[in-house]
Amino acid sequence: MNISKARLKRLPKVELHCHLDGSIRVPTMIDLAQKDNIKLPSMDRNELKKMLVIGSNRGTLEDYLKRFDYTLSVMQTPESLTRTAFELIEDVSKENVKYIEIRYSPILHTENGMTISESVEAVQDGLKRGEKEFGVQSGIIVCGIRNISPEVSLKLADITVQYKNKGVVGFDLAGAEENYPAKDHREAFYLILNHNINATIHAGEAFGPSSIHQAIHYCGAHRIGHGTRLKEDKDLMQYVNDHRIPLEICLTSNWQTRSIRSLKYHPIKFYYEQGIRVTLNTDNRLMSGTTLTDEFKLANDLFRFSLHDFREFTVMAAKSAFMPHLKRVELLHNIAEEMEQEFNLEPEFIDRK
């Protein structure tokens, strides 16, 4: 059944995998560059957008990540972080996102003297303002970086502990996956887990299922970012399913980084039919040139997912959110009520999902 984009836009949504430095508005980039005297490859809105948005110019994960040098260059002050966080909340509110987890690495925003703590507080300020104005709940996930030293990851884990219950809801490991194993950063995850903090790790995107195995069994990940190649290890896939470890799926991004040879071969439908907790996400709204509504539409066009299926995706995302259980239950009930009233979808919270 073909579902219109307008109808999909109205669906209540939850997003768990969205990078702040990959979701900045192009006009904001230009404005910040002018204010802070930063050189960008172009100050023309259309030209800059063409350079930053991947489109059909597929490359490696490393090629994809190079574009972040430009966005990060204009995000080196508290004011810029507060603004971009606020604007991201405004953007997602327009497609009825009820809750979003926004991830970024504070260490990448300290080139001009901003401290890691100032960085976290600036993002939190923007998110709080966004919630007050647009009603979208949010949380920060702090990212360690695979290709930066494990000592830095430990430092970032420590700041995560400091800001637990102060806007930060989890810890992640992002960056170039191949040749930078998660197990090298396990000391950071020991600190995270010993302070009862949630963890998610980018894994199984540019490298095989052994990367997912490390994320879960060496670092204790509660969720997996992408997990595209999980199906290559059936035993591990069964473990992920049995333990209800959610996958943060990003369809457009996975195609652009060549994690899959073609979108029609993406394993999301296979995972869903196995009962694995799969969630739909944008990854980077700017670089991937997408929105959560676009990802829903892509899933509908490619795999014929129905409104019933999208309700399940949203329920699974809400169940997997890094928020206190009682708040999660409240979020689920609010989503279920809206689904029932607006779309005649009864609130069946199926346990197998």
Image (cartoon, rainbow, N blue to C red):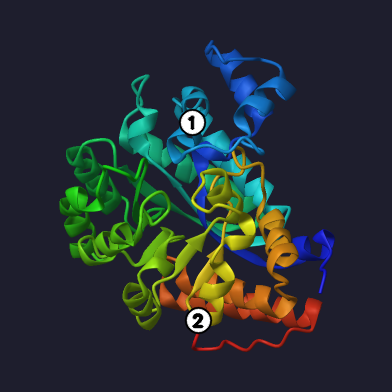
Q: Which residue does the image show at 19% across and 42% down from the upper left? A: 150
Q: Which residue does the image show at 44% across and 70% down from the upper left? A: 246
The part of the image, by quadrant, that contains residue 5 is: bottom right
Residue type (three-letter) at the residue carrying disc 1: Phe
- The residue wearing badge 1 is 68
Q: Examine the rendered structure and indicate whether residue 184 appears above or below residue 267.
A: above
The circle on residue 78 is none
Q: Position of residue 315 (x, y in %)?
A: 57, 76
Q: Quadrant of the N terminus?
A: bottom right
- Residue 234 in the figure: left or right of residue 124: left
Element at label 2: helix
- The residue wearing badge 2 is 274
Q: Position of residue 280 (x, y in %)?
A: 58, 62
The part of the image, by quadrant, that contains residue 191 is: bottom left
Report crowding for label 2: few under 14, some 14 to 19, many 20 or more residues within 10 A (C-alpha): some
Q: Which residue does the image show at 15% across and 52% down from the upper left? A: 187
Q: Examine the rendered structure and indicate whether residue 251 appears above or below residue 241.
A: above
Q: Position of residue 276 (x, y in %)?
A: 47, 77
- Residue 275 in the figure: left or right of residue 347: left
Residue type (three-letter) at the residue carrying disc 2: Gln
User: Between 9 and 214, which is closer to the camera in this rendering?
Assistant: 214
